[in-house]
Each structure stands twice: as C-alpha cells, then as structure tokens.
Amino acid sequence: MKKLLLVCFALCVVTLTVSAQGDNEAKIRLQIESVAASMKTMQCDFAQTKYLRMLNDKMVSTGKMYYQQSDKLRWEYTSPYSYAFVLNGSKVLISKGSRSDVINVNQSKFFKEIARIMMNSVVGKALNDKRDFKVSLSATSSEYVATLIPQQKQLQQMFQKIILHFNRQQAMVAKVELIEKRGDRTVIEMKHVKVNSPINAKTFIVN
C-alpha cells in the first residue's frame, strides 16, 4: 500500500520537483512546470507491469487513475483484480472487494510525509526542497527523462530510484519506472490521458 501511494504521487505531482542544472534543463523545467500549473484535473487508463527479478517473470494489471488539484486522487485496478484507494485531503480510503478501510493521514507518519511531499509539489515549494529526491534530467528527441533518487530513509528502503518519462511535445508523464531495492521493477504506462475534463465528485468520496 505504501508503494502504491508513492506511485500515484509520482504520477500526478512529481513534475514540479525537477531542479535545473543549466540553461537547457531550466527551459525543460519551465515547460514541465507550466503544464503542471495549468493541470486542474487529470484522468487516464494505465497498464502496470511488474518484473520479478528472482522469478524471471512479470505480472500485468490495468486500471484507471483520477486526479484533481490539489489533494484528490483515485487509483483503481480493474484487471485482473478489483482494488482501489482514494486520497481526499487528510483521509485515504482503501477498498478491496466488499471490504473498505479509511485511514487518517495525520495519524500515520508515512502517509503524512507523502501528503506533505504531494502538497509541496502542487504549490511549487518542492522546487527548493531537496529533502525528498535528488533529481537529474536528460532529454532525447522524443522525451524528457527525470531520474529521482530518494533522500528520505523510508523511501530509500523501498526504492533505488524512480524514473519518469515525459512526452516531449506535451511535457506530461507518459511512463514511470520504479526500481526497488531488491531489483524488482515496475513499469506504469499512461494511456488515453484527459486533462482538465470534469470529474464526477463521487469519484473521490471517502466514508
């Protein structure tokens, strides 16, 4: 669950944590920031593939993601199983089958920390906050690539690094790679992305 929440955070708001190291990177950062600042809502389908190093195998799942500025998020798996969680302000709803649990973010140190990172990113404070990730940025003819090295101890225990692939033309995240400490790798690809389209308020209900 902790990893899942971090995945969603990375997909939705980590675009604002890129720090420039030179004129070219500064221009890239400004382009990404401009797109992120104008993003009020985002919804998409996703395909997630987990590669297991020890078993030389992979697991594929699909689902939908919804984001609304600045503190609402829904991440839902639809195949091969049904699982969802909703982040709405200070509360998280975890739903699996007929069971649902609500967590108060303020009562969990980890969830509170992730919420802090998320909010700082949304309002732009993360630009000057190097506590969370060390970021390097590169570019190819078709994409921008941001490599995030966790600086927080709890994040370091889970991930070696997080790699974000941005569509160069749209300056939006198209793919995320999560490299775990033990070598397993998760790749999430975004599809059918809609930005600033209305989202039903019921999508983010937590009760």
Image (cartoon, rainbow, N blue to C red):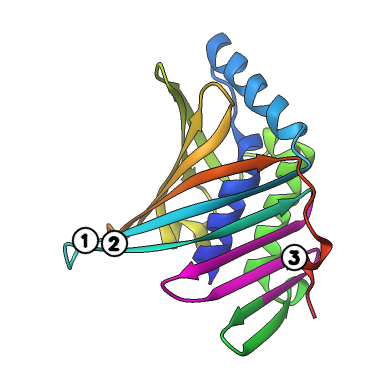
Question: Alpha-carbon distance for marks 3 and 1?
Answer: 35 Å
- Depth check: 45 or 134 in front? 45
Q: Which residue is mark 3?
A: 203
Dot 1 surroundings within 10 Å: few (below 14), some, or many (20 or more)? few
Residue 156 vs 197, above or below: the answer is below
Q: Nearer the viewer, residue 188 or 195?
A: 195
Q: Single out the residue that lies furthest toward the top.
A: 23
> Hey, what amino acid is under mark 3?
Thr
Q: Which residue: 76% across, 65% down?
A: 204
Q: Position of residue 203 (x, y in %)?
A: 75, 65
Q: CA distance from mark 3 to mark 2?
A: 35 Å
User: Residue extending furthest bottom?
Assistant: 98
Q: Are marks 3 and 2 in contact (CB under 8 Å)?
A: no
- Magenta run includes residue 16: no
Residue occupying image coordinates x 54% and y 19%: 21
Q: Position of residue 50 (x, y in %)?
A: 33, 60
| Number of the label disc, if any, that sits on residue 53 | 1
Which element type, helix, strand or loop, lies under badge 3? helix
Front disc: 3 or 2: 3
**In the rendering, at what x and y percent does residue 40 appear?**
79, 42
Residue identified by numbered label 2: 182
Give the vertical position of 97 relative to 7 (above or below): below
Q: Residue type at mark 2? A: Arg
